[in-house]
Image (cartoon, rainbow, N blue to C red):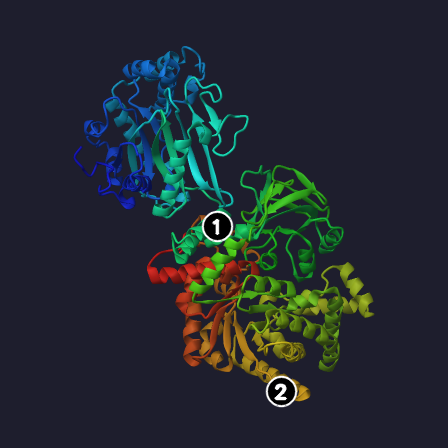
Amino acid sequence: MPDTPFAILITPTAPIATASHGGRAKCLQRLVRLELPVPCTVALSFAAVQNIAAGDLPDIPAILGEFHEDALLCVRPSSEVPDWGGPSAVLNIGMNDARYVSLCESLGKEAASSLYLRFVQSYAVHVARLDPDVFDDVEEGGPDALREILIAYEAETDEPFPQDPGEQLAAVLRSMARAWEGTTARLLRQAKGAPGDAGLGLVVQEMIPGLGQGECGSGVLQLVDSKTGAPQIIGRYLSQSQGREALGAGREALFLEKDTRGPSLEELAPEAFARIKEHAELMRRRLREEMQVEFVIQNGNLHILDGVRVQRNSRAAVRIAVALALDEIISPEEALMRVDAHALNELMHRQVAPDAERDVIGCGIAASPGAATGRLVFTAAEAQASAARGEPCILVRRETSPEDVRGMHAAVGVLTEKGGMTSHAAVIGRGLGLPCIVGASNLKFITKKKQLVSAEGRVFRAGDTVTIDGSNGEILAGEPEMLEAAQDDAFRTLLSWADEARDIGIRANADTPADAKTARNFNAQGIGLCRTEHMFFDPGRLTVMREMIFAETPSGREAVLERLLPMQREDFQELFRIMEGMPVCIRLFDPPLHEFLPATKTGQRELSEALDIPVSDVTRRVEELGEYNPMLGLRGVRLGVTVPEIYDMQARAIFEATLEASKDGAPVVPEVMIPLVSAKREVEMVKSRIDAVAAAVATERGESFDYRLGVMVETPRAALRAAEIAPHTAFLSFGTNDLTQMTYGLSRDDAGRFMSNYVQQEVFPEDPFHVLDVDGVGELLKLGVQRGRGANPEVTLSICGEHGGNPESIAFCREAGFDYVSCSPFRVPIVRLAAAQLAIGAKTGTTAPTYT
């Protein structure tokens, strides 16, 4: 057949490319080049298939002329990326009455009838578009099944089943081409990441029946386990040999072990089995990938029909990539580029098994990955009691507050009715590595009765067992099968290569010693954000904190804070020791004071008893501290200016802890960060007091120490006035959670109620609290970087919002010139890999698996 743009015989030198003919066609050409026994195959290009869909058929006789006269053919799709799919393959094209008679003589009536019957059914459904129910009355395997199905076909189509192989082939090509152009197919492939106008190639290949007197059958083989990536010969083989009692037609044989289903392929056909393994190993080396070999054995002769990339889950993907690099088949850099950074979540957290039954009762926003099963509890105190009994529990709240942190520590998962990706529950959940779903508004939360009610009316009470899947946002009834986390040697090896390749620093947000240890275990390069307010919600400290709030004078506040000083000092000292000289950035007190006061009458009565003051005084103080919009009220640096005793105490605790921790190892250089700054004067005022505390500590102890003072840039004004602020600071850390909130005028705790609708209607391309808005918020960040570094070239620039843990946002951070990003501890491995992929891509021009 002359090579044309429409169809081309696959040979070692044929002009075939993945971009023009698809992945399957290109892979078959590579197998031909390896001199593997591939049946005769013709490839049709994307352009050819488009023309076929438009009614312009290729030279069908020329295509048929490439095969021997009696050959049966199959047509398979060949998309550019195999995961994009394509129309179902059609087998046994060319089967007709005359060929049936011939095959009856050579293979026997039963085998010939089976081939013809399967072709008629496939042709009827996929080409003639008949309803499969048409053949329900045909007795499968009956003596007259073939005759009955041909009669049924003619009755439905008003014409006999086509007998001309050319007519059959043309109809199959036309049907598959038009199916690819259909709306449903377009939507399906777009859901898999394909462009709507993605092309499709087709391959026409000679069928090897795998039927006969000698050893015959078909199967697949691969050299690794798809679930673990461990080396293991896995596959299946369907023996069709006639006259065999041990393994009759349609019986499956295992490759490795003999069992009740019959002997293994190695026993049935040892030479063919050995050759298949050799071919699989050759494909692995030469195609630089773990491949599944599709083969047919015909009278003992081996034929390779196709080679496809082994399907794999995330843990297998990591192990396969690392093994290929260790065997020097690919480079470590290429191994890094083959693993989706997002997929590392599956290795760091328990997951619901892919094949587990899922009884979904509701859904929300997947705020923190991983899955957890436990009994429902509705208060932080109940969660702590449940943990004390050794019973896993799921903490259910309308929304969490800092008072719930201890309950979150005790629970195995958190579920809230309200909130979004940067709500309190989401941020703390990610920091703890705790599965979390927020914004589950399709469930009814009846907290007074301690009940959850699904949209269908199913009621779940305190003590009932549920599972939350924080990776996809589903709430499940009961306890499905789980897959455990898998941070094995391959995982650690891959990340060590990532550290060698990346060109941006990575720290972790860590508020507790446990967080800091997790950060160290994941090789974070320090702590980029320590939120000190969480330390005050310990029951032993909360009452003291409340006493300070009720103090009437600065001296009264100082006296109470003096009791908190040793507690804070101990907190910081432990963090410094865990981080062993690595930088630790401590954000000074940030939240409004009302968060530390009880909101309920019962809580206010209890506080009045604890402080020995009238309930009316408690109520009055709660009302005084109440604000219409507390997130924009008296908090952050505004507290530091108006109630400076808090920052004085914290600075002293930091500096005294610095001196103590430095005695045991490398000198500690703490980083002190002022939150919510919007004006230069705020920085000057707080800086002068902190410098004075540092000088006082150094004088009292007779020891000098270094520290770095910086600003958390969370307001648009701070970003715009960075040139004024930067000269007074050693670093600027951009808190993108609040910066996004203030730039959009959106409450990050309430946006989850409508954000999905906004994204679906393309108002926003993505949730800006989840994926950094590089156009709006990004412009502020760039201005802050340019103006801050212009005024102070030595200033360190970083991002410490939740966007720092999002791979899609790392590219912007690299381009904008940030020195490091800081993220939740359990996001550190993901960011390490994503940063490495971006650095490699910048050098090689390649792109990471799912983002640029």
Mark 2 or 1: the one toward you: 1
| Few, some or many residues within 10 Å of mark 2 (<14, 14–19, 20+) | some
Q: Nearer the viewer, residue 625 or 398?
A: 398
Compared with 154, 502 (above or below) is below
Q: Position of residue 606 (x, y in %)?
A: 80, 63
Q: Which corner quadrant holds the N terminus?
A: top left
Q: Is residue 753 visible?
A: no
Q: Residue furthest top?
A: 144
Q: Is residue 559 visible?
A: yes
Compared with 139, 787 (above or below) is below
Task: Give the numbered dot on residue 483.
Answer: none
On the image, numbered disc 2 is attached to which residue?
695
On the image, numbered disc 1 is attached to which residue?
319
Q: Residue furthest left?
A: 2
Figure label count: 2
Q: Nearer the viewer, residue 351 or 779?
A: 351
Tag 2: amino acid: Ala
Residue 105, picture quadrant: top left
Q: Position of residue 446 (x, y in %)?
A: 68, 46
Tag 1: amino acid: Arg
Locate residue 836 relative to residue 482 in the image: left or right. Answer: left
Locate residue 454 relative to residue 187 in the image: left or right. Answer: right
Q: Position of residue 94 (x, y in %)?
A: 28, 22
| Few, some or many residues within 10 Å of mark 1 (<14, 14–19, 20+) | many
User: Dot 1 lies on which element?
Assistant: helix
User: Dot 2 lies on which element?
Assistant: helix
Q: Nearer the viewer, residue 524 or 622?
A: 524
Earlier sequence position, callout 2 versus callout 1: 1
Q: Nearer the viewer, residue 269 or 319?
A: 269
Compared with 265, 559 (above or below) is below
Q: Which corner quadrant holds the C terminus?
A: bottom left
